[in-house]
Image (tube, grey):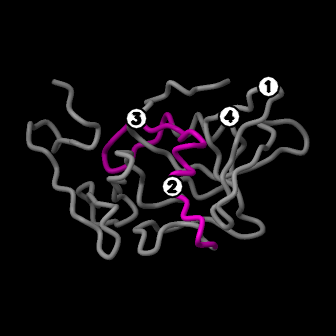
Amino acid sequence: MRKPIWELFIDETDTPVAWIDHKPNLRFALYNGGTTNPLDDLVLDKETGLIWPRNANVNGTALNWLDANTTCRGIKIANRIGWRLPTVEELSSLIDTRRTNPALPTGHPFVGVKFGPTEWAYWSSTSHENPDGSAWFVNLGSGAAGLATKGGNPQVLGFLWPVRGDRGGVSWNW
């Protein structure tokens, strides 16, 4: 029987980690990766089954699309590897269309969320359907999704918010 992705195990044991319900929004549960740094915590979205870093700014700087993809694949959070850029649908699943700045559900557990006029875009792994070098992004200020060029001049920069679970890299579109 296949175990769900959120059934993480304590390092080198068969003991599952304990997810703690996040209050006030029980849609989310938290896991501390064994450090004293809350930026190393993980968040389980119980609605989608996806695992997100609690810190929505793990890299600390905006990157072009290719560097964002590469960085996600090499990142280690809460002593876990296997991170990837989310699809535009996965990133959009966090959006609450009734809210702005940020457009996330009331009582969400995330920290470091980037939004505003100069910090506008989180990259997704989803390329535009036509091979024109564009990828979808999500603006966490407004909650809107849009297209931006992956490279070129001028270079478009966006933030990365890696995810684990679900499609596991099936959507890699170079």
Residue interval drawn in magenta: 73-100
Task: Give the residue pinned by disc 2.
Answer: 58
Identify the image quadrant of residue 127.
top right
Q: Is residue 26 above or below residue 49?
A: below
Q: Nearer the viewer, mark 1 or mark 4?
A: 1
Q: Amino acid at mark 4?
A: Leu
Are the two marked residues, 1 and 3, in contact with CB atoms closer than 8 angstroms? no
List x then y, in percent, for residue 98. Answer: 58, 71
* Residue 84, magenta (yes or no): yes
> Mark 2 belongs to which amino acid?
Val
Separation (CA) of disc 2 from disc 4: 16 Å
Asked if the magenta segment contains residue 170, the reply would be no
Residue type (three-letter) at the residue carrying disc 3:
Asp
Q: Quadrant of the N terminus?
A: top left
**Who's the residue at 50% across and 45% down the image?**
162
Task: Report if the CB atoms under discs 2 and 3 are less than 8 Å apart.
Answer: no
Q: Nearer the viewer, residue 111 or 106?
A: 106
Question: SS of the residue at dot 3?
Answer: loop
- Mark 1 and mark 2 lie on one chain; the one further toward the N terminus is 2
On the image, numbered disc 3 is attached to which residue? Answer: 166
Residue 20, percent from left and from top: 21, 63
- Earlier along the polypeptide chain: callout 2 or callout 3? 2
Task: Check residue 130 in the rendering and tell me which mark sits there, or answer none.
Answer: 1
Instruction: Specify whether 13 is left or right of 132.
Output: left
Task: Point out residue 48 in the picture as x, y percentages from the top left corner.
Answer: 39, 47
Please name the residue shown 91% across and 40% down the image. Answer: 153
> Which label belongs to residue 34?
none
Q: Quickly name the residue at label 4.
A: 66
